[in-house]
Image (tube, grey):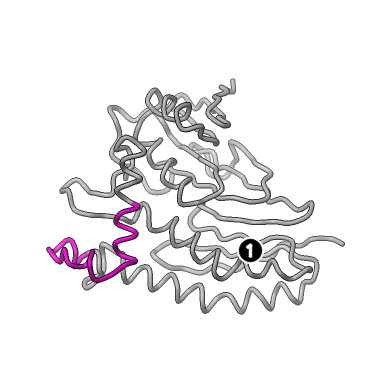
Amino acid sequence: MKTNIKSVVIESMTIPFTISIAGHDDQLVKQLLQQLIQPVQAGLEVVNKRYSTYLEGSLVNDFRNGDDDLLKRDAEFKQVYDACLKAKAITNGYFDPFDDNDLYDPLGYVKGWAIKRLFQTELLPLMKHPEIDGVCFNGGGDLQFAGTGDFKWTIGIEDPKATNQLVASYQLQNGGMATSGYSKRGEHIRVNGAPDLLQVTTYSSSLTKSDIWATAGLAAGEAEFRRLIQANKLTGCFVNQNHQLSYFSGGMITNVE
Protein backbone atom coordinates (compact mmCIF):
# COMPACT_ATOMS: atom_id res chain seq x y z
CA MET A 1 0.00 0.00 0.00
CA LYS A 2 1.17 3.54 -0.75
CA THR A 3 2.72 5.50 2.11
CA ASN A 4 1.78 9.17 2.44
CA ILE A 5 3.44 11.71 4.72
CA LYS A 6 1.43 14.41 6.47
CA SER A 7 2.77 17.13 8.75
CA VAL A 8 1.72 19.85 11.16
CA VAL A 9 3.81 22.82 12.34
CA ILE A 10 3.92 24.15 15.92
CA GLU A 11 5.65 27.40 16.89
CA SER A 12 7.56 27.45 20.15
CA MET A 13 10.82 28.97 21.43
CA THR A 14 10.73 31.18 18.28
CA ILE A 15 11.37 28.00 16.27
CA PRO A 16 9.03 26.06 13.93
CA PHE A 17 8.60 22.47 15.12
CA THR A 18 7.24 20.02 12.55
CA ILE A 19 5.52 16.75 13.44
CA SER A 20 5.38 14.31 10.51
CA ILE A 21 3.65 10.94 10.29
CA ALA A 22 4.00 8.50 7.41
CA GLY A 23 1.27 5.93 6.92
CA HIS A 24 -1.11 4.23 4.52
CA ASP A 25 -4.33 5.25 6.26
CA ASP A 26 -4.84 8.97 5.65
CA GLN A 27 -7.70 9.34 8.11
CA LEU A 28 -5.73 7.73 10.91
CA VAL A 29 -2.67 9.85 10.14
CA LYS A 30 -4.74 13.06 10.22
CA GLN A 31 -6.41 12.00 13.47
CA LEU A 32 -3.11 11.18 15.17
CA LEU A 33 -1.56 14.46 14.04
CA GLN A 34 -4.40 16.45 15.57
CA GLN A 35 -4.10 14.48 18.81
CA LEU A 36 -0.39 15.30 19.02
CA ILE A 37 -0.67 19.09 18.77
CA GLN A 38 -1.77 19.81 22.34
CA PRO A 39 0.61 17.54 24.28
CA VAL A 40 3.63 18.44 22.12
CA GLN A 41 2.86 22.17 22.36
CA ALA A 42 2.44 21.89 26.12
CA GLY A 43 5.67 19.93 26.47
CA LEU A 44 7.63 22.51 24.52
CA GLU A 45 6.19 25.35 26.56
CA VAL A 46 7.18 23.66 29.82
CA VAL A 47 10.76 23.28 28.55
CA ASN A 48 10.81 26.91 27.45
CA LYS A 49 9.51 28.19 30.80
CA ARG A 50 12.10 26.15 32.69
CA TYR A 51 15.21 26.60 30.53
CA SER A 52 14.84 29.88 28.64
CA THR A 53 17.49 32.54 29.20
CA TYR A 54 14.98 35.17 28.02
CA LEU A 55 12.06 34.54 30.38
CA GLU A 56 12.18 36.15 33.81
CA GLY A 57 11.56 33.52 36.46
CA SER A 58 12.86 30.56 34.45
CA LEU A 59 14.94 28.06 36.37
CA VAL A 60 17.96 28.92 34.26
CA ASN A 61 17.69 32.61 35.09
CA ASP A 62 17.16 31.83 38.77
CA PHE A 63 20.33 29.73 38.64
CA ARG A 64 22.22 32.48 36.80
CA ASN A 65 21.12 34.88 39.54
CA GLY A 66 22.69 32.74 42.25
CA ASP A 67 20.16 30.05 43.19
CA ASP A 68 22.69 27.18 43.27
CA ASP A 69 20.34 25.06 45.41
CA LEU A 70 18.36 24.30 42.24
CA LEU A 71 20.85 21.52 41.59
CA LYS A 72 19.71 19.90 44.82
CA ARG A 73 15.99 20.69 44.59
CA ASP A 74 15.25 19.83 40.98
CA ALA A 75 16.41 16.44 39.67
CA GLU A 76 15.69 17.21 36.02
CA PHE A 77 17.49 20.55 36.17
CA LYS A 78 20.55 18.78 37.63
CA GLN A 79 20.33 16.06 34.99
CA VAL A 80 20.42 18.65 32.19
CA TYR A 81 23.21 20.60 33.90
CA ASP A 82 25.33 17.47 34.32
CA ALA A 83 24.68 16.43 30.72
CA CYS A 84 25.86 19.85 29.50
CA LEU A 85 29.09 19.54 31.50
CA LYS A 86 29.65 16.03 30.14
CA ALA A 87 29.07 17.30 26.58
CA LYS A 88 31.67 20.00 27.15
CA ALA A 89 34.16 17.43 28.40
CA ILE A 90 33.73 14.87 25.60
CA THR A 91 34.00 17.56 22.90
CA ASN A 92 37.22 19.01 24.36
CA GLY A 93 35.31 22.13 25.36
CA TYR A 94 33.99 22.98 21.89
CA PHE A 95 30.42 22.45 23.04
CA ASP A 96 30.21 25.09 25.74
CA PRO A 97 27.05 25.58 27.86
CA PHE A 98 28.35 28.90 29.21
CA ASP A 99 28.13 32.25 27.41
CA ASP A 100 30.78 34.94 26.95
CA ASN A 101 30.10 36.15 30.50
CA ASP A 102 30.52 32.61 31.88
CA LEU A 103 26.80 32.38 32.63
CA TYR A 104 25.03 29.03 32.24
CA ASP A 105 23.19 28.82 28.89
CA PRO A 106 21.89 25.31 28.11
CA LEU A 107 19.79 26.23 25.06
CA GLY A 108 22.27 24.56 22.70
CA TYR A 109 21.58 21.29 24.49
CA VAL A 110 17.97 21.71 25.59
CA LYS A 111 16.36 21.98 22.14
CA GLY A 112 17.69 18.62 20.95
CA TRP A 113 16.99 17.06 24.35
CA ALA A 114 13.37 18.32 24.29
CA ILE A 115 12.80 17.06 20.74
CA LYS A 116 14.15 13.62 21.58
CA ARG A 117 12.16 13.38 24.83
CA LEU A 118 8.85 14.41 23.24
CA PHE A 119 9.56 12.12 20.30
CA GLN A 120 9.95 9.19 22.68
CA THR A 121 6.89 9.97 24.82
CA GLU A 122 4.43 11.27 22.21
CA LEU A 123 5.43 10.13 18.69
CA LEU A 124 7.22 6.80 19.03
CA PRO A 125 4.21 5.02 20.66
CA LEU A 126 2.27 5.64 17.41
CA MET A 127 4.46 3.05 15.71
CA LYS A 128 2.31 0.38 17.40
CA HIS A 129 -0.33 1.05 14.72
CA PRO A 130 0.26 -1.29 11.77
CA GLU A 131 -0.96 1.48 9.44
CA ILE A 132 1.88 3.81 10.53
CA ASP A 133 5.22 3.46 8.73
CA GLY A 134 7.17 6.28 10.34
CA VAL A 135 7.20 9.27 12.67
CA CYS A 136 9.47 12.32 12.73
CA PHE A 137 9.85 15.37 14.97
CA ASN A 138 11.81 18.27 13.47
CA GLY A 139 12.78 21.41 15.35
CA GLY A 140 14.46 24.03 13.18
CA GLY A 141 16.18 21.40 11.04
CA ASP A 142 17.21 19.10 13.89
CA LEU A 143 15.20 15.90 13.91
CA GLN A 144 14.56 12.56 15.57
CA PHE A 145 12.83 9.97 13.41
CA ALA A 146 11.81 6.32 13.17
CA GLY A 147 10.49 4.00 10.51
CA THR A 148 9.55 0.39 10.00
CA GLY A 149 9.57 -2.17 7.20
CA ASP A 150 10.94 -0.77 3.95
CA PHE A 151 10.12 2.84 4.82
CA LYS A 152 12.95 5.36 5.09
CA TRP A 153 12.91 9.11 5.64
CA THR A 154 14.46 11.29 2.95
CA ILE A 155 16.41 14.03 4.75
CA GLY A 156 17.76 16.93 2.73
CA ILE A 157 20.65 19.08 3.95
CA GLU A 158 20.36 22.70 2.87
CA ASP A 159 23.18 24.40 1.02
CA PRO A 160 24.51 27.05 3.46
CA LYS A 161 25.05 29.49 0.59
CA ALA A 162 21.72 28.82 -1.15
CA THR A 163 19.15 27.57 1.35
CA ASN A 164 16.59 26.87 -1.38
CA GLN A 165 18.92 24.15 -2.66
CA LEU A 166 20.31 20.96 -1.16
CA VAL A 167 23.98 20.20 -0.65
CA ALA A 168 23.37 16.59 0.45
CA SER A 169 20.57 14.07 0.96
CA TYR A 170 20.22 10.99 3.17
CA GLN A 171 17.85 8.01 3.15
CA LEU A 172 17.56 6.87 6.78
CA GLN A 173 15.12 4.86 8.84
CA ASN A 174 15.92 5.57 12.49
CA GLY A 175 18.03 8.05 14.39
CA GLY A 176 18.70 11.71 15.04
CA MET A 177 20.28 14.30 12.76
CA ALA A 178 21.36 17.84 13.61
CA THR A 179 22.78 20.67 11.54
CA SER A 180 24.64 23.70 12.86
CA GLY A 181 25.53 26.68 10.68
CA TYR A 182 25.26 30.41 10.12
CA SER A 183 22.75 30.61 7.26
CA LYS A 184 19.75 31.21 9.55
CA ARG A 185 21.13 32.42 12.90
CA GLY A 186 24.29 34.28 11.94
CA GLU A 187 27.43 34.21 14.11
CA HIS A 188 26.00 32.59 17.24
CA ILE A 189 28.78 30.14 18.16
CA ARG A 190 32.23 30.99 19.51
CA VAL A 191 34.73 29.41 17.15
CA ASN A 192 38.33 28.24 17.44
CA GLY A 193 40.24 30.87 15.45
CA ALA A 194 38.79 32.24 12.21
CA PRO A 195 35.50 30.55 11.17
CA ASP A 196 36.38 28.09 8.40
CA LEU A 197 33.32 25.82 8.46
CA LEU A 198 30.01 27.07 7.10
CA GLN A 199 27.89 24.15 8.24
CA VAL A 200 28.17 20.85 10.11
CA THR A 201 25.64 17.98 10.08
CA THR A 202 25.98 14.93 12.30
CA TYR A 203 23.92 11.74 12.51
CA SER A 204 23.62 9.15 15.27
CA SER A 205 20.98 7.12 17.06
CA SER A 206 20.26 10.11 19.33
CA LEU A 207 19.47 13.69 18.35
CA THR A 208 20.94 14.88 21.65
CA LYS A 209 24.32 13.42 20.72
CA SER A 210 24.08 14.64 17.13
CA ASP A 211 23.19 18.17 18.25
CA ILE A 212 26.17 18.32 20.60
CA TRP A 213 28.62 17.27 17.90
CA ALA A 214 27.17 19.53 15.20
CA THR A 215 27.62 22.52 17.51
CA ALA A 216 31.08 21.39 18.60
CA GLY A 217 32.19 20.82 15.02
CA LEU A 218 31.26 24.30 13.92
CA ALA A 219 33.07 25.76 16.94
CA ALA A 220 36.18 23.61 16.51
CA GLY A 221 36.98 24.55 12.92
CA GLU A 222 37.91 22.17 10.13
CA ALA A 223 41.34 20.93 11.22
CA GLU A 224 40.33 20.20 14.82
CA PHE A 225 36.95 18.79 13.80
CA ARG A 226 38.65 16.32 11.45
CA ARG A 227 40.57 15.02 14.45
CA LEU A 228 37.39 14.83 16.55
CA ILE A 229 35.58 12.97 13.75
CA GLN A 230 38.24 10.28 13.65
CA ALA A 231 38.69 10.03 17.42
CA ASN A 232 34.94 9.74 18.09
CA LYS A 233 33.95 7.84 14.92
CA LEU A 234 31.37 10.45 13.93
CA THR A 235 29.01 10.31 10.94
CA GLY A 236 27.63 13.19 8.86
CA CYS A 237 28.94 15.91 6.54
CA PHE A 238 30.36 19.42 6.64
CA VAL A 239 30.81 22.35 4.26
CA ASN A 240 33.94 24.48 4.61
CA GLN A 241 34.54 28.13 3.72
CA ASN A 242 35.53 27.10 0.17
CA HIS A 243 32.08 25.52 -0.18
CA GLN A 244 33.65 22.06 -0.35
CA LEU A 245 31.44 19.24 0.91
CA SER A 246 32.99 16.43 2.94
CA TYR A 247 31.22 13.30 4.18
CA PHE A 248 32.33 11.32 7.22
CA SER A 249 31.08 7.91 8.32
CA GLY A 250 32.29 6.08 11.40
CA GLY A 251 35.25 8.45 11.56
CA MET A 252 36.32 8.01 7.92
CA ILE A 253 36.28 11.28 5.95
CA THR A 254 35.60 11.58 2.20
CA ASN A 255 36.11 14.89 0.40
CA VAL A 256 33.68 15.64 -2.43
CA GLU A 257 35.03 17.69 -5.32
Q: Quadrant of the C terminus?
A: top right
Q: Quadrant of the N terminus?
A: bottom right
Disc 1 packing (10 Å; few <14; some 14–19; many ≥20): many
Please give the name of the residue rendered at 31% of the width and 54% of the height, measured from the top-left corner: 82
- Residue 100: percent from left, percent from top: 19, 45
Q: From this view, report whether residue 154 is shown above or below residue 49.
A: above
Q: Nearer the viewer, residue 96 or 75?
A: 75
Q: From this view, report whether residue 50 is shown above or below residue 148.
A: below
Q: Would you say 28 lies left or right of 46 here?
A: right
- Residue 10: percent from left, percent from top: 51, 69
- Residue 6: percent from left, percent from top: 68, 66
Q: Residue furthest left?
A: 66
Q: Which residue has dot 1 on it? A: 20
Q: Would you say 192 lies left or right of 201 here?
A: left
Q: Secondary structure at mark 1?
A: strand
**Predominant SS along the magenta part:** helix
Q: Is residue 72 magenta?
A: yes
Please give the name of the residue rendered at 52% of the width and 79% of the height, measured from the top-left corner: 38
How many numbered marks appear?
1
Q: Quadrant of residue 69?
A: bottom left
Point out the stretch of residues depicted in magenta.
61-83
Q: Nearer the viewer, residue 250 or 26?
A: 250
Q: Residue furthest right?
A: 1
Q: Quadrant of residue 168?
A: top right
Q: Is residue 39 magenta?
A: no
Q: From this view, report whether residue 82 is shown above or below residue 237.
A: below
- Residue 153: percent from left, percent from top: 68, 51
Q: Would you say 11 lies left or right of 86 here?
A: right
Q: Quadrant of residue 81?
A: bottom left
Please name the amino acid that badge 1 sits on.
Ser
